[in-house]
Image: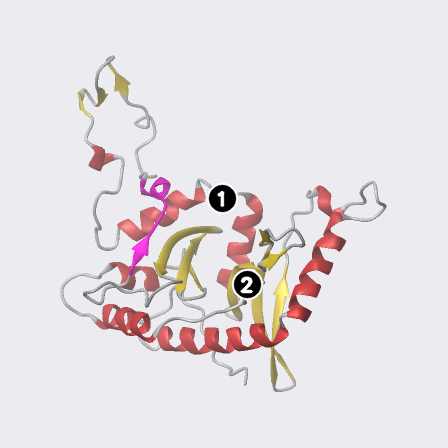
Amino acid sequence: MAKFERYLSKELLESLGKLSESRRGPTNWWQDVLASKDLLIAIRAGYLNIYAQGQSVFKIGSSTSTGVDKAGNPLVELHYKYLLKPSLPAGKEYVRFDGNEFHMGGKELDPAKIVQTKYTPAETVRELAAAARTYSGAEKQGVHEIARRNPSVIDLEIAFTKTNGDGKQSAPRIDLAALHDSGGKILVRFYEAKLASDPRLRQNSKGKPEIVDQMQKYDDFLRDNETNIHKAYINVCRNLAALGSHAVGEGCLHLARAPLD
């Protein structure tokens, strides 16, 4: 069974800290990420996922290395589908094809007009977040809004990875994890979101809703991995606090201010 872990390397934290503190010229990409209210940060095992409307727009870091390159810069990757610009004026979404070349506005198509080809301060991150909404459904958009409005949320799209009896791995995902103060003791609680129209909330051929078995599997995983999960979210709180110590203003960063240990 894969170990449930949450952490960032010292090198990655230092690299992101330097980016957030940089005051040379216009904002850089990481400052734009931190300032965005359309994005959410989730810490994984050695890397960050940056979410927009339930879609992982950025992966920052690495699960197999320090998460920075030889020059000390964070390793960043994203799916190319988010590079398509969502801000073309209505009626300008289509291009003409003459059998050989593609044209827009009577001219040969310029890829830079429809695809993000380089970073532009205060623009690129916003457009990437807007592009992500195209691929998001109502349930994920609802989860995003819940997380955005509740600073106690410290994780989302949480994979409960386990090895099945046939040796294959499965990774069902629960939607949210949040901190709760229970008489001075801080608890981590997990939440699964469903639309009211979801058929899994209703009785099936076995006489009970599918969601019942789904939640039982989550409960089993939490019970079997309690020690690792406890350690993982202590790390999450510490890493978020370290990232937040460099942030300016209110943006996507959810701060876990209360210690778990």
Quarter of the image that includes the C terminus: bottom right
In this view, 52 is above or below 73: above
Which residue is most to the top?
99
Residue type at mark 2 is Ala
Residue 164 within the magenta-colored segment of the rendering: no
Q: Nearer the viewer, residue 247 or 159?
A: 159
How packed mark 1 is, by other alpha carbons closer than 10 Å (few <14, some 14-19, many 20 or more), is some
Mark nearest the camera among 2 and 1 is 2
Q: Which residue is mark 1?
A: 136
In this view, 106 is above or below 134: above
Q: Nearer the viewer, residue 38 or 43?
A: 43
Residue span colored magenta: 75-83
Q: Residue at x 54, y 82 (%)?
A: 260
Residue 259 shown left or right of residue 205 in the figure: left
In this view, 232 is above or below 215: below
Residue 124 percent coordinates (x, y): 27, 49
Query: Spatial distance from mark 2 to mark 1, Cα to Cα?
Result: 28 Å
Q: Which residue is mark 2?
A: 2
Residue 232 percent coordinates (x, y): 51, 73
Q: Counting residues from the N terminus, which is met first, the one under dot 2 or under dot 1?
A: 2
Give the SS element for disc 1: loop
Dot 2 and dot 1 residues touching (CB under 8 Å): no
Residue 82 within the magenta-colored segment of the rendering: yes
**Colouring style:** secondary structure
Q: Nearer the viewer, residue 38 or 8?
A: 8
Q: Residue at x 23, y 64 (%)?
A: 73
Residue 85 percent coordinates (x, y): 31, 39
Which residue is most to the front?
166
Residue 13 shown left or right of residue 208 in the figure: left
Residue 155 percent coordinates (x, y): 51, 65
Residue type at mark 1 is Ser
Q: Residue at x 53, y 43 (%)?
A: 137
